[in-house]
Image: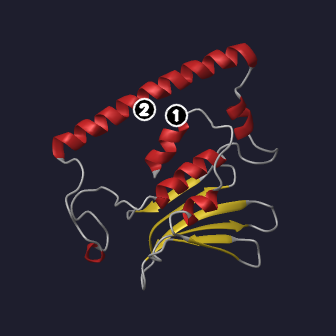
Amino acid sequence: MLAALTDTLLQPEPDTAPEIWPLLTGAGWTHEHDERGDEIARHPDGILSLRQWHTGTHGRYFWTVETPLPGHCNVWNATLDDVIPQHLLAAFVSALAVDEPVQRAMYDVPHAHLVHHERRGPQGEELAAAHKARLETARSLARKARRKTELLTTQSGPPAAVRAASGPPGRSASPTVALTGRAR
């Protein structure tokens, strides 16, 4: 999921970002509204949920992803605030909706008794080579984006993405992303 966010940061901002809830409902998640205007989507297995909730008095809202296990606290959660650009949120949510297992070291999973373990995808040196290639591609895209931004800034001031990211007056210009846990 973090890779989805960072990869999206390196791409040009789209003219329109997809709506969030259809990304999840199209993957079989349920979607509900409550009386306060908050919304929640739940994965079909019931272990993963995405909630958009409002603070009420300040007109701000937050996105919270939680992975609770029955009888346990959250194994993993993430919180994003309302300053995050819609296309970054859509990339994060799209990664949540993918129903593929997260690759990690064998048995490096909290509550390992609750999951099925199998070898899948690249292993060892093949995995290291794929990771190295991904990093080289990301660095190349970042260099291109910096050069393009520098060129645009010298020609016409800050790019539109920077101006848009500053948001309305009185709000933080940087989105807040908080991740905890190890499960996803």
Distance Cα–Cα, label 1 vs label 2: 7 Å
Judged from the image, the secondary structure of the residue bearing numbered disc 2 is helix
The quadrant where residue 33 appears: bottom right
Foreground residue among 172 and 77: 77
Where, quadrant-wise, is the C terminus in this rendering?
Answer: bottom left
Quick check: 10 above or below 66? above
Q: Is residue 165 left or right of residue 110?
A: right
Foreground residue among 99 and 117: 99
Residue positioned 46% across, 61% down in the render: 180
Q: Are marks 1 and 2 in contact (CB under 8 Å)?
A: yes
Q: Which residue is mark 1?
A: 10
Amino acid type, label 2: Ala
Which numbered disc covers residue 53? Answer: none
Q: Residue furthest left?
A: 124
Looking at the image, is mark 1 or mark 2 earlier in the sequence? Answer: 1
Q: Which residue is mark 2?
A: 138
The colouring scheme, among rainbow, by chain, secondary structure or one colour, is secondary structure
